[in-house]
Structures are given as structure tokens and as C-alpha cells.
Image (cartoon, grey):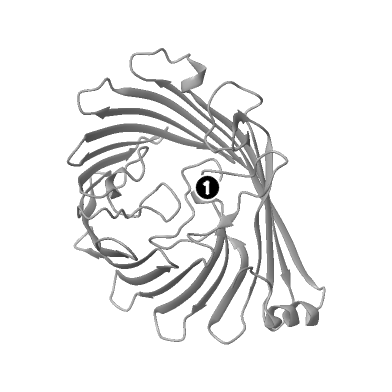
Amino acid sequence: MKKIALSLVAISVLSSAAFAGSVKYSGDAKLFYSAVNSGGQNFNKKENNLFDVAGSLKSEIKIDNSFNPVINWGLTAVSNFNSKSGSWITHQASPSDASNKDAIWLDTLNLTFNPFANTTMIIGRQQLDTPMVFSEQWNIAPNTYDSVVLANTYFPKTTLVAAYVDKSNTGGLTVNYYSEESSFKDFGTKDGAYAFGIVNKSLADTTLQAWAFDVAHAAKVGWLQADTKYMGLDYGIQLATRNPNTGDTGTASAIKVAGSISGIGLSAAYSTVSKDGQDFVNVGGAQSKLYTDAWWMVGTVAASDTKAYTLTASYDFDVVNSSLYYTHSKTAEIVTKETTLTFDKSFGKLDTSLALVNVQKDATASDNEIQAYLTYHF
């Protein structure tokens, strides 16, 4: 399957649909800024800072039809107004020219419908959320995928998922170059990737997941996860394997426990990745779904030969919600420590967030960052 096209079933859905239905619009405007004090340099050194402004417009078109078709489309634009600062998401002039240019791209275009009872199919560009292939929300614009997803809920409290992924914009780290080719490239290899999953909620307060991924000509990944609640505490366990076409099989495991005391949310997690040269980062992306993944230095805990633990605490002070994150990861070569303090507050449709980040790698000078996030929903 080289290119994704609407299937005959999908085309028949659209051709037979009446134009009666409904249309909804939504969107947001974002401003992300990060000032960095790296290696003793001042916060006002623009080249070390990050700055981007983005806007998105999305539409959901529901059509009255027995297949319940819905057409979703969305546009995103990003700019840093020719600032000398770095950018959150790569939108440089060309692969060889690192200067930033304004970019606009179609981040969503898909058809959702019900071809059979208890079955939903989504064809086209969309966000995904699986343990090893997912849209990352930390960036100013999440990555999306050209894919086909089929989900079935025939069995009680069970969802069966099958997906084919053809293209993506590299984990959300790159968008269209200015007046150049699309940033949506073949996913993994030219033959894309397949994902199969089972999600079961038969046990009270428990979610069980089993996933298998096949990135053509590259690797096969298995992922098991169980999350449950018992006596007021949340528990979780993750087990994963990655078998490359060439090289040794790698493994990863993680556990977590979370709860609250006097309104203070607390959690602790520990993970380990074997030293076989395999990582458990989002394929083509930056983040990891391991419980220990850091707030800012995403993906660090998922590298080969890494042991990590994460501690978090949060409290709602009414006037502001504050959270403290600490992540410690260790490989044979380096120890990375991240401490992040966040303050979050919403004013109607405006979400605001301030983050103070400190990153220490071995005995080198620590990096300090002050990050501000503004998001207005409309």
C-alpha cells in the first residue's frame, strides 16, 4: 500500500449521503516561549531561546447517513516572526537553510464512518495514540499520520484495533518547508508500519493492553500494559520487546504507583531498558510512553541501557495549580537529572502555564529554562 486513498466503501458512503447534517468549527492560537541559561550564558541570548506562534482551525462535518460518516479537516500555521530565536518545531527555509520561515499545512483530513455494527474506520490524516506510534502533545503542533485505523467493540468491554501507517511528519518535529515539498514522509520505511492492539476493561478499575507493531524492514515491537486502581492508589506495569531485523532484541519494563494525600497528588515510577542497542521512543518521534518519561527531556529514559525513576507531586492552590517533577536517568555514559516546577491557570478560554526547568548532566554546568505557554481556544 504505497498511498492512502478512500476505499470503495468510503466512496459509496459519501456518494450516497444526503447533504443534511451539521458542521462544527474549533481552533486555537498558541504562543510558546522558552528562555535558556545554558553553560552560564545569559537568558537573553536569543540563539539559545525558543519562540513560536501557531494557530489552528479544525472542522467536523457530520452527514446524515446510516454509515454515520464524519469528515474532519484541520489547518495549522506557525511563525516566529523572523526572530533569531530557535523554534519549537522545525519550519526552516530548506533542509540546507536553518532560517525559519512561516509554514502552513493540512494536519488533519480524514473520513470516519461505521462500515459494520460495532466497527469504526478512520481513513486519512489523523492523530494516533498507541504505545509506540502516537501524536506528541508537548510541541506547539502535534504530529499526525496518513493512516487507516479500524476499531471494533463487538466483545464486551473490549476494543480491537488494527492500523496501517503510511506517512507522518517525523514525530511532530518538522513541518512543511517554505515553498518546498511536504514534510509528510514515508513512515519508518517506504512500506510503512502496521499496528494491532487489544484493550480490555472487564476487570473493575482496570485497563489491560496488548499491542504488536511491525515497522516494515526495520523492527517488530510488542507492548503489554496493565493499569489498575486498588484501595485508593493507582498501579501500573509495562513490559515491551523490540526485535530489529538486524541486531539484538531489546526489552523494557516500568512500574508506577500514584495516589493523593490531603489533596496532594503523588506518584513514583521506575523503568529499565536493556543494553541491546534498542530504544523505546515513539517511532520517528521524541517522547516515550514509559511511565518515567521526563517532563522536558522527553525520551531520555527510553534509550538503550538506561535505568530511570520519576517522582511527581501536584497541588491545586485554587488560584493556581502547581506540579513538581523530578526525573533521574542513568546510562553507562551519563547521568541526567531534570527538575521541573510548573504553574497552570485557566482564564475562561485562555490556558496559561509557566515552567521552571533545570537539567543537570553529570558534572557539566546545568541548563536552566523559563518557559511560558499561552493557548486560547475558540
Identify the residue at image location x=28%, y=33%.
338
266 vs 33, nearest the viewer = 33
Identify the residue at image location x=65%, y=24%.
82
Image spot of residue 316 (x, y percent) = 36, 39
Q: Secondary structure at mark 1?
A: helix
Residue 236 appears in the figure: no
Q: Quadrant of residue 336?
A: top left
Residue 22 higher or lower than 294, as above or below: below
Image spot of residue 217 (x, y percent) = 43, 66
Q: Where the N terminus falls, by quadrant?
A: bottom right
248 vs 40, nearest the viewer = 248
Image spot of residue 99 (x, y percent) = 61, 28
Residue type pointed to by label 1: Gly
Identify the residue at image location x=47%, y=50%.
136
350 vs 293, nearest the viewer = 293
Residue 85 as seen in the image, left or right of residue 240? right
Residue 82 as seen in the image, left or right of residue 194? right
Q: Which residue is mark 1?
A: 172
Q: Quadrant of residue 209?
A: bottom left
Q: Badge 1 local density, few (<14 within 10 Å), some, or many (20+)?
A: many
Q: Quadrant of residue 344?
A: top left
Q: How many marks?
A: 1
Residue 206 higher or lower than 27, as above or below: below
